[in-house]
Amino acid sequence: MRRIGVHIALVAGAALALAGCGFADIRAPVPEFMRAKVPEAAPLEPPPNVKRLLKDKLDSVFTAASQPANVRVSEPRPNLRGPGWTACVKAEVVSVTGKPLGTQTYRIEISDGVIADRRQIEPEDTCNNESYEPI
């Protein structure tokens, strides 16, 4: 009986020791053959037709009450923060009370051919350096 208990303990100890022998992650300081393979980047989807998207769904960027006029868009660029594309959109808008607010610029994110997000530009955005075309 004692002998069986010793064998079980040895097998359990060997299994525990071998459980840690998996592959190291891609940044581990071990030889290359012991590292996990680097995952392949997802293929980039083709650039979207931003002008058509904005013509169809301008209300996803500007509210109807803002009465956007002179709408202009930049060329789409690959999104550096994730999948999809980004573009910059400018338009002359008015406030809810009808007072002109001037030109407002937004960065839009396009994923799977749909405007997924929009946000007003920040100082570090490159929208001020882009060239724009009317839609």
Image (spheres, rainbow, N blue to C red):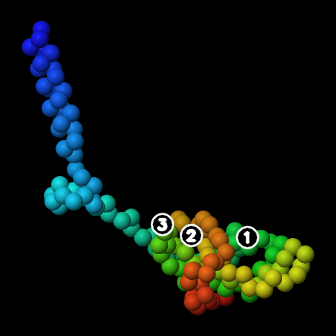
Q: Identify the residue under disc 1.
A: 59
Q: Is residue 86 left or right of residue 99?
A: left
Q: In the structure shown, which secondary structural element does the residue marked by tag 3 occupy?
A: loop
Q: Residue, x 11% and y 20% (percent of image)?
A: 7
Q: Which numbered tag is attached to residue 110? A: 2
Depth order, front residue of 126/131:
126
Q: In the structure shown, which secondary structural element does the residue marked by tag 1 occupy?
A: helix
The disc labelled 1 sits on which kind of residue? Asp
Residue 74 in the image, given as x and y percentages of width and height: 59, 84
Marks 2,1: beta carbons within 8 A: no
Depth order, front residue of 21/55:
21
Q: Residue, x 14% and y 26% (percent of image)?
A: 11
Q: Is residue 7 left or right of residue 89?
A: left
| Circle nearer the viewer, 1 or 3 | 3
| Residue 22 is at least partly visible in this image | yes
For this orientation, the residue located farthest to the left is 3
